[in-house]
Image: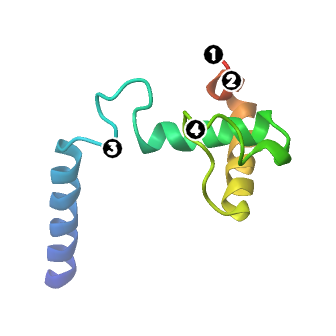
Amino acid sequence: WRSISKLFAVGFLLRIFAACLGHSGQGKAPMYGDFEAQRHWMEITIRLPASHWYFHDREWWRLDYPPLSAYHSWILGTMGTMVNASWFELYT
């Protein structure tokens, strides 16, 4: 049990340390890093036809992962829209 307790303690301390650090895109408006990229990919996949997913607005976060991850974004975006559609408005 001691080794398991030590393992959990080390993991907990690492999480606390990581939480104190910055994040991707912090302070770089308006794109704000990876979280905003994931949200934008969800809005692209739920608001545009599939034929436009990879060719939309290259100045912003363009969808640059394989189609399976695009469909994953579509599924999550569809579920998120059921909670709050304003999270995924393409042009706001």
Q: Which residue is mark 1?
A: 92
Amino acid found under the numbered disc labelled 2? Glu
State how far apart marks 4 and 2 are (Cα). Answer: 10 Å
Residue visible at 60% across and 38% down in the picture:
58
Residue visible at 74% across and 47% down in the picture:
74
- From the top left corner, tell me how far across and down residue 25 is, in percent: 34, 38
Q: Which residue is mark 2?
A: 89
Tell me which numbered mark, 4 or 2, is placed earlier along the sequence. 4
- From the top left corner, tell me how far across and down residue 2 is, in percent: 14, 82
State how far apart marks 4 and 3 are (Cα). Answer: 14 Å
Q: Are marks 2 and 3 in contact (CB under 8 Å)?
A: no
Q: Are marks 3 and 1 in contact (CB under 8 Å)?
A: no
Q: Residues within 10 Å of mark 4 (few under 14, many from 20)?
A: some
State how far apart marks 2 and 3 are (Cα). Answer: 22 Å
Q: What SS does tag 2 mark?
A: loop
Q: Residues within 10 Å of mark 3 (few under 14, many from 20)?
A: few
Residue visible at 49% across and 36% down in the picture:
36
Q: Which residue is mark 3?
A: 24
Q: What SS does tag 1 mark?
A: loop
Q: Which residue is mark 4?
A: 39
